[in-house]
Image: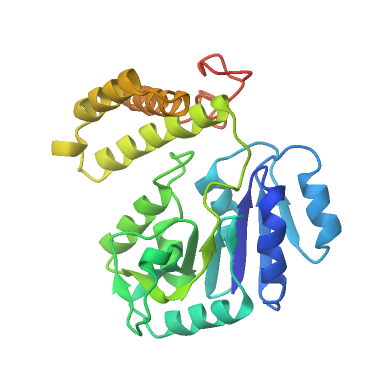
Amino acid sequence: MTIIIVSYNSAAVIIDCLSGLIEALPHQIRVVDNASRPGDVELLEKRFPQLEIMRLDHNLGYGRAANVALNAVQSRYALLINPDILVDAPRLAELLQQAASYPEAAIFGPATSRKHRQIVESAEEKEAISGSCMLFDMEKLRPLGGFDENIFLFSEEVDLCWRAREAGHKVLLLPRIYVEHLAGRSSGSSDAVEYMKNWHFGWSRSYFYRKHSRDRGKHALRRRFWLYSWKALIARRHYDKVKFRAIRDGIRAFQAGEAAFLADGRTPQASPDSPENPYAGS
């Protein structure tokens, strides 16, 4: 099995993640660094010299960066996890053992929240599972082409799960296996960063709904645009105003035919230092 972690300014949490994974060797561990701030990669290289670190010269986004590593995988299974996931060798072994019992499935996930944790033997078939910890059967994943590279951030894992199911494979939650997810701690934040993240949430969710013909009823773009416009207007907390305004702007950009990336095909829209981000420099 190959273990893949996509890291972006995640030094504060990835060390705890890797400390548990190192015990799981001889599995190959591959970290894809998405152009983090200076010092992050050097810290990992010093602390874990046995790691394979793939350094990218700019932030590709989650799915594109994951594809860089997935395209190089030679093992039967690949585990993609967030830097703020805590998992140890026994759980990895159990995850692989469970996956081998379901040859009809392409994507597996453990419980990453306590509400999903159950002491049961059987797997649960899902439309999609959390992107924070996904085990892939590479024989089934490769023909799907990996993550959709039109997406910079958010909904890429849901899209991949849907495409796996459309290809006739199952997506399974393995609720008896629990891994801790320190949600929201994998990268630093500011108003400008939060605006970018939520802009892409709005854009990516709209893209997913349109791609899979679900942009009707409660998911209709116009309805979602006005919903978040109203939420931004009435929100009292500054954080919520930034969030809802960004989601609204991402939906509007998708409606206008804008891509998630600028014309160069590599720079994400609404990046923290770009003119279109109203909180640039914050």
**Quadrant of the drawing holding the N terminus:** bottom right
Q: Position of residue 43 (x, y in %)?
A: 82, 51
Q: Using residue 71 as the reference point, say whether residue 104 is left or right of it.
A: left
Question: Percent position (x, y) of residue 209?
Answer: 26, 41
User: From this viewpoint, is residue 71 visible?
Assistant: no
In the picture shown, does residue 31 fall above or below 177?
above
Please, which residue is most extreme toward the right here? Answer: 46
- Residue at 26% in and 60% down: 166
Q: Nearer the viewer, residue 7 or 261?
A: 7
Looking at this view, name the residue that lies furthest to the left. 217
Identify the residue at image location x=35%, y=85%: 121
- For residue 136, side relative to residue 45 (left or right): left
Q: Quadrant of the C terminus?
A: top right
The one nearer the camera, 122 or 206, is 122
Query: What residue is at 37 percent from the left and 67 percent from the top?
Result: 116
Residue nearer the viewer, 153 or 18: 18
- Colour treatment of the image: rainbow
Residue 219 found in image quarter: top left
- Number of numbered discs on residues: 0
On the image, the x and y values in percent for residue 117 come to: 39, 71
- From where the camera sits, is residue 242 visible? yes
Q: Position of residue 246 (x, y in %)?
A: 42, 25
The part of the image, by quadrant, that contains residue 225 is top left
User: Is 90 in front, or is 270?
Assistant: 90
- Residue at screen point 67% across, 70% down: 21
Q: Against 117, is 131 above or below?
A: above
- Quarter of the view holding residue 101: bottom left
